[in-house]
Amino acid sequence: MTSGFDVLYIGGYTPDTGGSGAGLTVVRREEGGVLRALAETAAPGPSFLALHPRLPVLYAALEREEGGVAAYSADPDGPGLLADAASGGSYPCHLAVDPTGTWLAVTNYGDGTLAMFRLGSSGLFDGRPRLFPHEGHGPDPARQAEPHAHQAVFGPGRALHVTDLGTDEVRRYLLGTEPAVHPEGPVRLAPGSGPRHMVHHEGRWYVAGELDGTIAVYDAEWRELGRTRASEATGQNHVSHLQLSADGGHLYVANRGPDSIAVFGVETGEDGAGLTRVAEVGSGGLWPRHFALAGDHMYVANQRSDAVATLMMRDGVPVPTGETFKVGSPACVLAVPQ
C-alpha cells in the first residue's frame, strides 16, 4: 500500500459519456504540494464517488443512459472492480453510503428514480435495489420538465433526504428494516430554484440552487431562514457543490460560470441563521463541478479545463496555488489522508 500525504480518487466523464477521462484516477499529493499519478482504472463515466465508512470499498455512479453503479477496492495502487449492477434508472449522478454502512443510495438524474441498495458485510450489493420513482415538474421547461433526483444525504436520524432539481423539492425517506417514503411527503422549495447539493449542520440545511444561483438556509422544520446569491459575479451561475468546514464556521460553494469558490461565514442561533460573505476566489480552472477539503488543502475538479486544482487554505479562505493535475473531464474528487 502507498503511504504519504493526501490520496485523491478522481472520477469523471469518459469518451463514451461525453468526456475525455480515463475512468478512475488515483493521485497522491507529495511533499511540496505536487500531485503525482498512482494508478488508472477504466470505468464508463464514473461521475460521482463515495467511500464505505468502514471498509476499503469505493463506489462509483456510472452516468450513462443505461445507468450503472460499481464497487471497487479502495486501493491507492489501483482500484479493482469488485461488483457492478444496474442503477435502477438513467444517468445516475450521485451516490452516498449511510453512516452504518447498511444502505447505498443512488440518485438517477435522468428519470428521477432513487435506488436503495442494501450492502452486505463485505460492502457489496446484497440483492436487487429498492426503487423509488417520482413525479412532477418545475417552471423551467428546459431543465424541469420531469423529476431529476440529484443528491442523497443521510441524516439527521434514520432518514434520507434527496434533492430533486426537476421538481424543486427535497424528497424524504425513512430508514427502518426497509426504506420507505416519509409519510409527510417531500419538502417544496422555491419554484425554479433547482436544488442540486445540500449539507446539514446543527439543525440547519444549506441548499444550493443550480438554476437560480442562490444558497438557501432552512431550519429543522424546513422553514426558509434566508437566501443569498452564491456569487457576486454578473451573468448566469450554475451552482454545483457546497461543503462546510470541519468546525462548521465556513461554507464553501462552487460556482460554474463565474468559475469561483465562494466563502461564507456561518451564523447560527435560536432566532435564525445567516450567511456572511467572506471571500470569492478563482477555482483554478473552468467549470468547478466538485471539490474536496483535506486539512489545509482544497482540491477542485474543474471539468472544462481537464484538471484538478490545488488551493491552500489560509484563515479559512482557499487561495489558488497555480498547481494543477491534468485529468480528462473531472467531475468528482475524494481526498483521503494517508
Image (cartoon, rainbow, N blue to C red):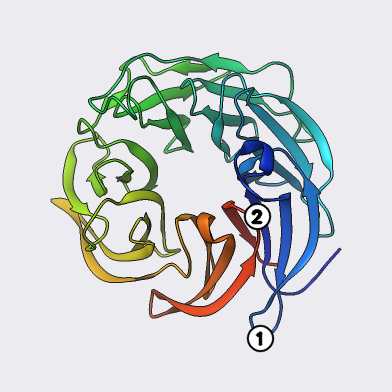
Left/right of residue 68 with respect to residue 276 in the rendered view = right
Does residue 215 sit above or below 113 in this rendering?
below
Q: In which quarter of the image is the N terminus?
A: bottom right
Q: Callout 1: 10 Å neighbours few (<14), some, many (20+)?
A: few
Q: Callout 2: 10 Å neighbours few (<14), some, many (20+)?
A: many
Q: Using the image, tell me which numbered label, if any, was put on residue 311.
A: none
Residue at 28 percent of width and 64 percent of height: 264
Q: In which quarter of the image is the C terminus?
A: bottom right
Residue at 74 percent of width and 37 percent of height: 71
Q: How many labels does the image show?
A: 2
Q: Can residue 34 be seen in this view?
A: yes
Q: Which of marks 1 and 2 is nearer the N terminus?
A: 2
Left/right of residue 280 with respect to residue 95 in the rendered view = left
Residue at 22 percent of width and 63 percent of height: 232
> At which x and y percent is residue 256?
38, 54
Does residue 252 sit above or below 181 in this rendering?
below
Query: What residue is pinned by disc 1?
Result: 32
Pick whichever, 40 or 235, lies toward us: 235
For this orientation, the residue located farthest to the bottom is 32
Query: What residue is pinned by disc 2?
Result: 10
Does residue 230 sit above or below 319 in this rendering?
above
> At which x and y percent is residue 196?
38, 40
Which secondary structure, mark 1? Answer: loop
Q: In which quarter of the image is residue 62?
A: top right
Which secondary structure, mark 2? Answer: strand
Say if mark 1 contacts mark 2, CB within 8 Å.
no
Distance from Cα at disc 1 to Cα at disc 2:
20 Å
Q: Is residue 249 visible?
A: no
Q: In which quarter of the image is residue 125?
A: top right
The three-letter code of the residue at mark 2 reads Ile
> At which x and y percent is residue 315?
38, 80
Pick whichever, 290 or 3, lies toward us: 290
